[in-house]
Image (tube, rainbow, N blue to C red):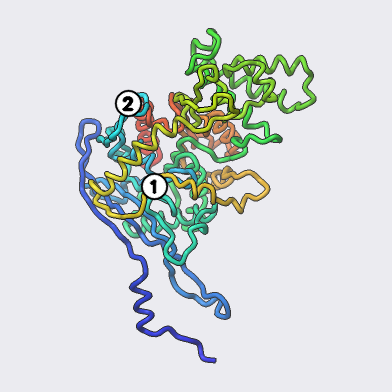
């Protein structure tokens, strides 16, 4: 039977129906450090295509490139640069998974930021944007990427969005977009950086390996903001004592902030954290590892010390089997005041209807950012950037979060520690900067330190990793003094990671 062929009319109609790029270019200025910067913003979607093969009886026969998704991005490039190949470019995304890039965009790195109080507390609506005097644009061009199903990024008609909601496909699709952008805008010679927050740090570490091995793209640096590379450090499970150990210093910082510690521990946060860290990896870790082998007297003594460091009663610690879980701690610390503390930023407090429950119902620190960032972005993208779309901009898609799959990590914890180690040992010029919030209970700083102590780099590459600490939470940039310090640290990191 002769092979069926598509009619010219049908082929032309199919071609016309294919998605196309939708880009808008605008020009702006921002004042940074007393000087005015002129820059170009490119906003819109690029069609992400993959080479495909026919299926069925013709399996293995090349079918050409097929559109899979339209990826939304906003790129800021400095004007008047004589040689763009020497200009650093930073590709930026947030986490979730299921989050758009709006948080780092309008909170920390972009030329515009959400106006807020110095401490980061919620202001009264309506909200507005102001010039971001702490933008990284002075030191690097910026490309903010929304992974598929976040922001305005979508799978194309005929493709299944869930195919992009996996650990591996997410890294591949974001990596392929970076490759495509560098090719389109001739930035392969530029020094290249990745900046990720939260699950975005997991993505960034995975990308460092993927970009090297799949596309031969070597990076200059990774900026990991509120980092998680090994999920074992965060998963409170009956057989996993690691989170209990690694969360304790952040519990202590939270208790210190809310003045729940005894006078001696309330005097100096840094000294208190040093003591909490020594106890956590010393007596406390030993006690937890003993399990039921810990005698009653020692158990009581350990419970008393835990209670002293984290600002709750000894009775509560003993009822928690010496292992206060994060969501329970957020409820317990200020229970006598009928207040909860935030998971993303434990400086913030909220009120649950039920003050007797075991864990917090809502995270008060998330409520501080959701409204201002959503309103300002939706106005900004259509107004100043001139991009029109009737799609809802998915700031944070809980549907995507719930559908996310880690098929490649079945029967083990998700981790990208080995991917990062391989990337750094292959590209010995790859530098890593890690930003930690002391009041972050989502990705606690001590867990991050533990991960990097087990990264496995040889001594001669230990200096490739550096860290910064900020007196705020997961999104430390909502605290304006921390935003200023973060910008200084990131700018210095970019400069130090590029050939003079």
Furthest-top residue in view? 263
Q: Residue at x 47, y 18 (%)?
A: 257
Question: Residue drawn 58% across and 38% down?
Answer: 455
Residue closer to the observer: 352 or 427: 352
**Residue displayed at 61% across by 53% down:** 408
Residue 178 drawn at (x, y percent): 41, 54
In the picture, the quarter occupied by the C terminus is: top left
Q: Which mark is residue 268?
A: none
| Residue pointed to by mark 1 | 91
Could you give the CA–CA distance between mark 1 and mark 2, rounded to whole angstroms?
A: 28 Å
Numbered disc 2: secondary structure:
loop
Tell me which residue sits at (32%, 55%) in the image.
390
Q: Are marks 1 and 2 in contact (CB under 8 Å)?
A: no
Viewer-nearest residue: 253 or 135: 253
**Height in image: 273 above or below 74?**
above
Q: Secondary structure at mark 1?
A: strand
| Residue 32 appearing in the image | yes
Quadrant where the image shows the N terminus: bottom right
x, y (%) of residue 20?
A: 33, 65
Residue at mark 2: 117
If you read the primary sequence from the N terminus, does the residue marked by circle 1 or circle 2 appear first? 1
Q: From what the image shows, is residue 260 above or below residue 132?
A: above
Q: Would residue 240 appear left or right of 340 to someone viewing this image?
A: right
Q: Position of residue 415 (x, y in %)?
A: 59, 44
Task: Report the number of discs.
Answer: 2
Residue 220 seen in render: no
**Horizontal arrangement in the rendering, residue 170 relative to residue 303 (left or right):** left
Task: Locate residue 344 relative to residue 70 in the image: left or right.
Answer: right
Please give left or right for residue 118 compared with residue 242 in the image: left
């Amino acid at each position: 039977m002769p092979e069926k062929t598509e009619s010219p009319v049908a082929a032309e109609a199919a071609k016309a129906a294919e998605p196309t790029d939708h880009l808008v270019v605008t020009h702006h200025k921002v004042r940074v450090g007393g000087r005015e910067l002129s820059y170009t913003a490119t906003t819109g979607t690029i069609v992400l295509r993959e080479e495909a093969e026919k299926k069925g009886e013709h399996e293995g026969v090349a079918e050409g490139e097929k559109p899979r998704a339209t990826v939304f991005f906003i790129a800021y490039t400095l004007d008047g640069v004589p040689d763009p190949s020497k200009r650093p470019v930073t590709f930026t995304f947030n986490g979730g998974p299921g989050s758009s890039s709006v948080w780092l965009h309008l909170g920390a790195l972009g030329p515009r930021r959400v106006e807020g109080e110095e401490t980061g507390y919620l202001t009264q609506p309506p909200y507005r944007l102001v010039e971001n005097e702490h933008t990284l644009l002075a030191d690097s061009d910026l490309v903010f990427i929304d992974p598929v199903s976040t922001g305005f990024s979508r799978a194309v008609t005929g493709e299944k969005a869930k195919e992009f909601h996996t650990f591996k496909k997410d890294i591949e699709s974001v990596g392929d977009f970076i490759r495509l952008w560098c090719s389109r805008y001739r930035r392969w010679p530029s020094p290249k950086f990745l900046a990720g927050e939260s699950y975005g740090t997991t993505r960034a570490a995975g990308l460092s390996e993927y970009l090297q091995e799949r596309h031969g793209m070597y990076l200059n640096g990774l900026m990991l903001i509120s980092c998680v590379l090994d999920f074992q450090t965060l998963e409170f499970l009956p057989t996993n004592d690691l989170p209990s150990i690694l969360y304790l210093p952040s519990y202590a910082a939270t208790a210190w902030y809310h003045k729940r510690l005894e006078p001696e521990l309330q005097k100096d946060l840094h000294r208190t954290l040093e003591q909490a860290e020594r106890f956590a990896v010393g007596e406390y870790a030993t006690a937890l590892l003993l399990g039921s082998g810990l005698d009653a007297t020692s158990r009581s003594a350990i419970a008393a010390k835990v209670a002293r460091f984290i600002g709750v009663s000894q009775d509560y610690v003993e009822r928690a089997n010496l292992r206060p879980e994060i969501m329970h701690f957020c409820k317990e610390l200020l229970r006598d005041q009928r207040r909860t503390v935030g998971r993303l930023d434990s400086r913030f407090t909220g009120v649950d209807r039920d003050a007797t429950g075991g864990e917090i119902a809502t995270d008060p620190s998330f409520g501080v950012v959701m409204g201002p960032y959503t309103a300002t972005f939706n106005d900004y993208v259509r107004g100043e950037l001139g991009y029109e779309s009737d799609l809802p901009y998915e700031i944070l898609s809980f549907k995507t979060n719930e559908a996310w799959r880690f098929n490649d990590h079945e029967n083990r914890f998700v981790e990208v520690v080995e991917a990062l180690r391989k990337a750094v040992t292959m590209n010995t010029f790859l530098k890593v900067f890690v930003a930690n919030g002391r009041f972050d209970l989502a990705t606690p700083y001590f867990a991050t330190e533990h991960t990097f102590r087990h990264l496995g780099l040889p001594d001669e590459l230990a200096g490739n990793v550096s860290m910064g600490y900020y007196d705020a939470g997961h999104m430390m940039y909502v605290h304006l003094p921390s935003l200023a310090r973060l910008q200084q640290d990131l700018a210095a990191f970019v400069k130090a990671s590029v050939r003079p």
